[in-house]
Image (tube, grey):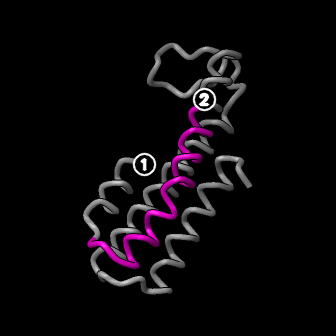
Amino acid sequence: MRRVEMVVAGTAPGPARESLEAFLPRVDLVARSVRAQCLRAQEVAPSSSAMLVPGGPDGEHPEVHRRLTRTATACAQVAEAAAMVRVSGEADPDLLAAVERAVVKAEELALLR
């Protein structure tokens, strides 16, 4: 979420910034959900390193790895779309819709929808 927060922090005060700030709690929930899923998988089938997504001895959690990777991509798309809003300096409905789509996708992948 840091990347999105940085984009929002660099956005001038006004409607564009307010619109972007509304997405931050949702992206934070995505990050918390993914972390919790990884911790649960780690308890069930520990990985050999804290930096590895738990897979289990027989690859029991390949869906966690896939979902984590796809969720990270969706979060990067949120940051990219938010940067486009920042660059435009306006609360452009089309650009904000792109942010919304990316947030919704991340929420779905994080099992929040």
Type of amino acid at the residue the image marks with label 1: Met
Res 43 → quadrant: top right
| Residue 38 marker | 2
Q: Which residue is mark 1?
A: 1
In whole angstroms, how far apart are the C-alphas of marks 1 and 2?
17 Å
Residue shown at 52% from the left, 47% from the top = 28
Determine crowd level at label 1: few under 14, some 14-19, many 20+ residues with C-alpha closer than 10 A: some
29 vs 108, nearest the viewer: 29
Q: Which one is earlier in the sequence, the residue at label 1 or at label 2?
A: 1
Q: Nearer the viewer, residue 76 or 56?
A: 76
Q: Secondary structure at mark 2?
A: helix
* Magenta segment: 12-35
> Could you say where residue 59 lies in the image, as x and y percent from the top left?
68, 25
Q: Is residue 92 above or below residue 35?
A: below
- Quadrant for the C terminus in the image: bottom right
The amino acid on which the numbered mark 2 sits, given as a three-letter code, is Cys
Q: Is residue 51 left or right of residue 33?
A: left
Report the residue at 40% width, 79% height from top.
Answer: 15
Q: Is residue 89 left or right of residue 1?
A: left
Q: Which SS does the magenta portion mostly show?
A: helix
Whole-percent x and y of residue 112? 70, 50
Q: Is residue 63 above or below residue 87?
A: above
- The quarter holding residue 33 reads top right
> Residue 93 magenta-drawn?
no
